[in-house]
Amino acid sequence: MSRLFTLFFIFGFSIFCSLDAQVVYQDINKTSVYNYLDEMANLHKINTNPVIKPYSRQFIAEKLAELDTQRIHLNKRQTAELDFYLMDFNKELKGSFENKRFDVFYYSDSLFTFSLNGILGGQGWKNENGFNYHRWYGAEAFAYAGEHLGVYASLRDNTEKVRLADTGLISLRNGSKYRRGDYSEMRGGITYAWNWGHVALVKDYVHWGSSYRYPNIIGSKAPSFAQLKWNIKPADWFEFNYIHGWLVSEIVDSARSYTYNGVQRNVFHNKFIAANMFTFMPWKRLNLSVGNSVIYSDQVLNPAYFIPVFFYKSVDHTYNGNTNAAGQNSQMFFNISSRLIPKVHMYYSMFIDVMSFSSLFSEEEHANHWSMQGGVKVSNLLPNIALTVEYIRNNALVYKNDKHLLYSSNQYSLGHYLGDNAREIYIGLEFKPMKNLHFTSYFSMEQKGPDYPYTRSTGDVWGIPFMESIEWEQNQIGIQFNYQILNDFFVFLEAEKRNVNRSRDIIARQPDYDRYCSEFYQGDTFTWSFGINCGF
């Protein structure tokens, strides 16, 4: 009943907003248009909020329309890419479609718009450990009905010979629930929008936090989960985002599990997330964001966590008192994104799991469970060349909690992909010599310290040092080539030298096993990779 009441209230409120708007989210894995908008924002041609993704197709279309009025200030490659993306996003601008991208099926009139495309792709890897492949196929579609309603869906079937993103492995790839080497991915949702905001019920990925490598607030390592979203931007200087998500605990609730016809039916414990983010823009290209979240369980739903603007730690105190055993798992975070200097994007993001202000500046206490990430990207350092440098530090026990309240879904972390007691430095140099041709050379170093168990005992939780020793280290250097021949038709090639090291103590205990690394990348490897993706 509380779910129905909340949805009824939000949708009922939005009916009073009569101005036209439509929202369908653009897949965050289709990074090319996101990279293009980011470059244009760094060059002060447009303004975006990089802390919250995915963007809507309508938002992207409006930014492309802004750039269309500034062609004289774009170079040849940038102008050609603008025309290329307008072939797709003119659908939202109600353009003439003289150069519309190819769609398997497309229909549009004054009331209804519908687009359908197929998906087919594959990627292969070859190194000293053998050959691996990933193939996928499916379809995606979106529609607009009337002046406010949007619907979208994407279904992909996947097969991997060797699992590259299984539970516990350190990888930038989206996590999955494998059935042997296969897994399917269903994403999409329904939205209702007005000119200064929208609400949505979706099952999709979320990225919260400014980053070019991987965000540390909410990332897409966990499989997509159902969520109620609310976004408003009632003024140029303020934006608000909220989600309430239905997570997957994968912890069996024995009281609700049962046997039927001789088959055991396991029912998982309920698990939810509520999170909000307030973004203030005191100057045009400076975004200051602050928010908080809570992971809660042991109940069906709590209406208090459907109130978007709450500080959820205080709500938890009200409902559960001061006993650690009954409390939920709450977090705070803030993000700074500055493009005040032309061509330069500087950003800093902090995720706070446990914070003791008395020991905030004491390295001896090591009491604070937090993740901090900072970086800088310079676009057009030289014509069509960009440089990115990013660093992250995750203190011991950040993202950890009791198993019912872990900051995770389907056993994958919702936070940074490295997990706790880890650090990473990433350097990337990008070169775009012509339209849709993208080269990236990169270096990254990831390190993990000892893996400490989480316990409610104060003596065990506090006083754990950061990276007391390096238990696992991975170094990567490589070059990527990506060419988008047509809209959503990619060809990509990569060569990478990777070195994975473990401490002597771990090797002595587990000589043939690396818990963080897929068997395909263990040891010293030089990997060639080639792939193609057809969206047709």
Image (tube, grey):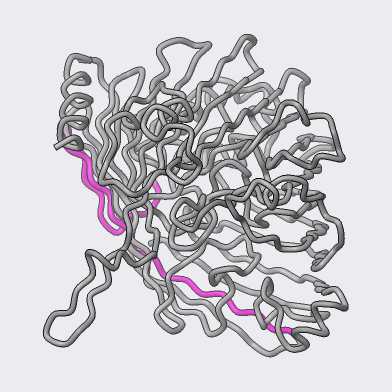
Image coordinates of residue 53 in percent, x first then y, are: 50, 38
The verdict on residue 102 being magenta is yes
Give the left or right position of residue 254, taking residue 46 as reference. left
Is residue 124 visible to the viewer in this orientation of the structure? yes
Q: Residue at x 39, y 65 (%)?
A: 250
Query: Does 107 sit above or below residue 331?
Result: below
Q: Can you say which quadrant of the picture contains the N terminus?
A: top left
Indicate the quadrant containing the C terminus: top left, top right, bottom left or bottom right. bottom left
Residue at (56, 75) in percent of width and height: 123
Q: Quadrant of the rendered structure where residue 163 is? A: bottom right
Q: Nearer the viewer, residue 295 or 373?
A: 295
Residue lying at 72% horizontally and 88% vertically, measured from the top left: 129
Is residue 242 depicted above or below 365 in this figure? Answer: above
Residue 328, x across and y down, in percent = 45, 41
Residue 465 counted in the magenta span:
no
Q: The magenta stretch spans which residues?
A: 101-127
Question: Residue 171: image x %, image y %?
Answer: 64, 64
- Residue at x-position 37% and y-position 46%: 272
* Left or right: 525 in relation to 81: right
**Residue 374 lies in quadrant:** top right
Up/down of 345 relative to 478, above or below: above
Q: Nearer the viewer, residue 296 or 336?
A: 296
